[in-house]
Every structure is written in structure tokens, then in C-alpha cells.
Image (cartoon, grey):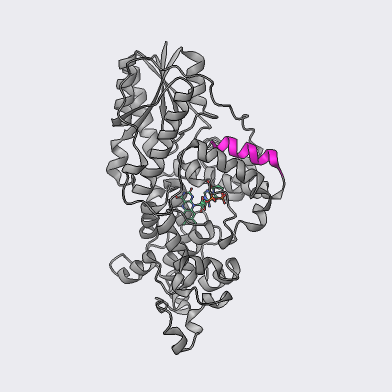
């Protein structure tokens, strides 16, 4: 007997329930990945993520080959292609991870329909893409949690399965055609400092993280220059590491660092359950308020300065340049640059969210859009009126200015925290630095924000 295992956002062999189930029920499996035309059409398929995906697929194929199998890659509409491969190989079942986006649920429905019409079965597995499935936890009187803390409390009590190991052997039927596996070197336009993807890299990073950074995470995760976070986000986004396994390993390590880290992992599930319940929140305000945003046209110059990392606020510029250079940004940087755009410049959060999605290697609809909404005060933040002051943020999370000097080399000659306020220099000193004046006055910005929010 044959089963198809359709890989989507779960590009790994360890802790992979669909693969495990397929191997348990059939003699041969077809590990399939579809380069989805629908995703390509949405513009979501940007160079940084395409390159990371190529690494993941190359790694998956290599891992399967070590076990006697190989990856089958096809392109087209995922549901149609997967159904066609099932028909071609006579597979009785197609195994897939439960989708956590609207796009994925529709794909799942259409694949299920297609397979049923052929007399085959779609088997959908939970706990693959998120640790706790969206919809599994609901508060009284609602279909999802809108506030993080009660969700976290409930989520923490869930018993997760122990992670599965990778299979020893995978036997793929002969003669199933595959297109060439996409190669990273064929992708142009990627960020110079983009990380390498793939399960092997993800597992190595997780192991190093457990031994190294995890213990100090509670104290250091907001340290901008410290590189003191796990860097696992793109691996989690593509499923090169399993969220269940990451939670499990952190819990086994224990301690305050691990607790703080597991809490962050819960944010990922939290946003996914919000988006699953309110798919429109990907582009509409989750809470129906504040829609007097300045448009792209109205604020074109300021938006361009923000994107280029030339707002005149050093820590904002440093973070925006990190995004360009690495396709990744520290969480504190994401918070303060997003607050700057949405609250200090009062620009529609969707403009910023789109820019992030154009560059982030971990760019994820649930995490990106709902974090943007959180920062813009239209999402789950219980203090939607707070505005982050970029100077104070810089002094607090980059106290010596090392992060700014790393990413804004024009200011590298300024020692210590003075780098956060170049406007305090005398005119003659300033003339030595090719660095812009602030695009906005912070007290005027705050007044505009408060007026707009009616407070
Ligand atoms: P760590 O600090 O090591 O955290 C471990 C993991 O927890 C992360 O890999 C991530 O999976 C999860 N996590 C941590 N914080 C959050 C959070 N606030 N929301 C959801 N999950 C979280 N994360 C994405 O994965 N994709 C995005 O597109 C994305 N866009 C964001 C946009 C904005 C405006 C903001 C404020 C945050 C965004 N985040 C996003 C969340 C967070 O910034 C990143 O997950 C984190 O910086 C990734 O680095 P890390 O893996 O080293 O994180």
C-alpha cells in the first residue's frame, strides 16, 4: 500500500506526525511538496523566504535520501497536484498537517473533496504547525482568546505529546517523477546576511540555544546588541523544527530562562488561534477602531525614510537596516519600529506590515499581522494607547549604543549612549556625520496620536 505525505509548513523529518502515521499504515510513502502557484500569485513568495525554503527542501530531500527515500517536488495548485499524485501512485491516503491559515484550510477542504470523489482519504494531523491547535482552547462565551495572559495560563496546562524521532527508513515507490529541487543559489535579490535554512541547521541552532542562550533568556531577551534570542523563528515558520519539540526541550531544561522562552512560544500559538478564528484580521482591524491613519500618499516621504532606515532616530534606523541586511529583526526592534510607524508617524499599520512581509525570512501572516495590530493598538494589546519613545527605547535596550553603531556606520564615531541623540551635537560636530534630521518631532507626534485617538 502507498500513502502520500503532503509537506507544507512542516519541512522536517523529526517529530512529524503525518509522516509517522503514513509509515505506520503503508509500505511505501510519497513525500510530496508542491510549489504552490496560489502562494506565488499572492506576492508572499519573496526572495528571502524563497531562499530559505529552497534550503529546507534541499535538506528534506537529503534527509530522505539518507533513509532510502527522496522528496518529490511538483508545482501547481497544491490540492489538485496532491490529488493527482495520489491517483498516479494509487495511494489510499494523503496525510497532511492541519492548516492554520485561511488559505491552508481552503486548500485542505478542496483536497479532501477531491480525494473523496476518487474514493481516497485525507488524514489531517494536529499539533504539527503549532504546539496547541487553533480552536483547541476556548474561553467561556467566545470562540477564541483575545487576551494573552488567560490564554497562556490555559495553554500551559495542556499536555503535549512527547516529540517523535525521525524515521529510520522511508521507502518511496519507483517511478514517481519529480521536478528539480529548488536551489538557493538560483534565488536572486536575497538579503546579504540571510541565515541558512533547513532541518539540520534548525536542530543545530536549537541544541546550541539550549546549552547557551536559554538560561539567560529571561534577563537578556530584550538586549538589542546581545543577539540573545534563539533565532528559531524562520525554522518555526517553515516547520524545520517542531514547535512541540522546542517547547518540550525548553521545559526539560527548566529554569526562569526556559519559562520566559516558552511564554514567547505561546505567543505564536496565541496569534494563530486569533487569526484562525478571525481570518479577516490579516488585513482588517481586529478591533473595530482608529481608522484615521495617514495614507501611503500623504506620508510618502516619511514612509520612504522609515523603510530606508533614515528617519533620524538612530535605534529605529538601526533596526530597519538590520531587516534589510538580514531579512530578520530583533523583537525589540520590531516593536519600536512598528510603534514609530503606526503611532509616531500615524501611518496605516498595513503599510508597515507589508514592508516587513517583503523582507522577513520568518514573515508569517498570523505573527506579523497580529503583532502589527498589537503594536498599532488595534489588536490584542490591553494598553492600546501606549506609544514607545524611540530615544528612551534606545537608551534602555541599547545602553552603550553598540547596536546603533553596528547598523548605522555613519554614527560609529559617536561613543556611548550619545549615539541615540545626534541632534544634541553642536552644528559643527553634526556636519561631520552624514545623518538625517529627525523626520518628526516626538512631542508633536504624541499630540497628533492622542488627538486622533480622542484622548
Ligand atoms: P525568541 O525570542 O527566541 O522567541 C522564540 C520564538 O517564540 C520565536 O522564534 C517565535 O516563534 C516565538 N515568538 C516570540 N515572540 C513572539 C511574538 N511576539 N509573537 C509571536 N511569536 C513570537 N514573528 C514571526 O515569527 N514572524 C513574523 O512575521 C513576525 N512579525 C512581527 C512583527 C512585529 C511588528 C512584531 C512586534 C513582532 C513580530 N514577530 C514575528 C514576533 C517576534 O518578533 C519574532 O518571532 C522574534 O523576534 C523572532 O526571533 P527569535 O526566534 O530569536 O525569538
Residue sitting at x 53%, y 45%: 232
Residue 157 place in picture, x, y as percent: 66, 38
Residue 238 placement: quadrant: top left
- Which image quarter: residue 39? top left
* Residue at the far right in the pictured view: 255
Q: Work out whether residue 96 can be spotted.
A: yes
Q: Is residue 246 magenta?
A: yes
* In this view, 283 is above or below 205: below
Which is nearer the eye, 114 or 90?
90
Is 38 situated above or below 377? above
Numbered disc total: 0
Residue 273, percent across and down? 50, 42
Can residue 284 be seen? no
| Foreground of the two, 161 or 380 | 161
Q: Position of residue 441 (x, y in %)?
A: 44, 79
Residue at figure coordinates x 36%, y 53% from the top left: 358
Residue nearest the observer in this picture, 12 or 36: 12
Residue 382 screen position, x and y as percent = 56, 58
Q: Is residue 359 above or below residue 27?
A: below
Specify the segment rendered in magenta.
Answer: 242-254
The residue located at (32%, 30%) in the rendering is 78
Residue at x 59%, y 35% (from the top left corner) = 245
Amino acid at each position: 500500500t502507498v500513502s502520500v505525505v503532503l509537506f507544507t509548513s512542516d519541512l522536517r523529518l523529526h517529530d512529524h506526525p503525518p509522516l509517522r502515521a503514513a509509515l505506520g499504515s503503508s509500505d511505501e510513502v510519497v513525500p510530496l511538496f508542491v510549489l504552490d502557484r496560489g502562494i506565488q500569485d499572492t506576492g508572499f513568495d519573496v526572495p528571502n523566504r524563497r531562499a530559505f525554503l529552497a534550503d529546507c527542501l534541499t535538506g528534506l530531500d537529503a534527509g530522505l535520501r539518507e533513509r532510502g527515500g527522496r522528496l518529490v517536488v511538483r508545482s501547481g495548485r497544491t490540492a489538485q497536484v496532491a490529488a493527482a499524485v495520489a491517483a498516479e501512485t494509487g495511494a489510499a491516503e494523503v496525510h497532511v498537517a492541519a492548516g492554520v491559515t485561511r488559505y491552508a484550510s481552503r486548500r485542505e477542504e478542496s483536497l479532501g473533496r477531491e480525494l473523496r470523489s476518487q474514493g481516497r482519504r485525507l488524514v489531517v494531523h494536529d499539533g504539527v504547525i503549532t504546539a496547541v491547535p487553533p480552536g483547541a482552547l476556548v474561553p467561556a462565551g467566545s470562540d477564541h482568546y483575545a487576551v494573552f495572559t488567560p490564554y497562556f495560563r490555559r495553554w500551559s496546562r495542556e499536555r503535549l505529546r512527547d516529540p517523535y524521532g525521525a524515521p529510520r527508513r522511508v521507502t518511496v515507490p519507483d517511478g514517481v517523477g519529480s521536478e528539480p529541487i529548488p536551489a538557493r543559489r538560483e534565488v536572486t535579490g536575497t538579503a546579504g546576511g540571510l541565515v541558512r535554512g533547513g532541518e539540520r541547521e534548525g536542530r543545530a541552532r536549537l541544541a546550541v540555544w539550549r546549552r547557551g542562550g536559554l538560561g539567560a533568556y529571561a534577563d537578556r531577551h530584550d538586549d538589542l546588541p546581545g543577539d540573545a534570542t534563539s533565532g528559531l523563528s524562520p525554522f518555526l515558520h517553515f516547520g524545520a523544527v517542531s514547535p512541540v519539540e522546542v517547547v518540550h526541550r525548553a521545559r526539560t531544561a527548566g529554569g526562569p530562562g526556559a519559562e520566559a522562552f516558552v511564554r514567547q512560544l505561546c505567543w505564536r500559538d496565541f496569534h494563530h488561534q486569533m487569526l484562525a478564528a478571525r481570518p479577516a484580521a490579516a488585513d482588517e482591524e481586529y478591533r473595530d477602531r482608529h481608522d484615521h491613519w495617514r495614507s501611503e500618499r500623504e506620508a510618502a516621504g516619511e514612509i520612504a525614510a522609515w523603510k530606508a532606515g533614515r528617519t533620524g532616530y538612530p535605534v529605529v534606523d538601526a533596526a530597519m537596516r538590520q531587516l534589510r541586511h538580514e531579512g530578520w529583526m530583533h523583537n525589540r526592534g520590531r516593536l519600536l519600529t512598528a510603534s514609530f510607524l503606526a503611532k509616531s508617524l500615524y501611518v496605516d499599520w498595513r503599510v508597515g506590515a507589508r514592508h516587513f512581509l517583503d523582507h522577513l525570512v520568518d514573515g508569517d501572516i498570523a505573527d506579523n499581522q497580529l503583532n502589527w495590530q498589537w503594536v498599532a493598538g488595534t489588536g490584542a494589546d490591553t494598553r492600546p494607547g501606549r506609544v514607545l519613545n524611540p530615544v528612551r527605547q534606545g537608551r534602555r535596550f541599547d545602553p552603550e549604543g553598540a547596536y546603533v553603531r553596528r547598523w548605522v556606520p555613519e554614527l560609529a564615531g559617536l561613543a556611548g549612549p550619545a549615539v541615540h541623540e545626534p541632534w544634541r551635537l553642536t552644528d559643527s560636530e553634526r556636519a561631520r556625520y552624514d545623518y538625517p534630521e529627525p523626520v518628526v518631532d516626538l512631542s508633536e507626534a504624541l499630540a497628533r496620536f492622542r488627538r486622533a485617538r480622542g484622548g
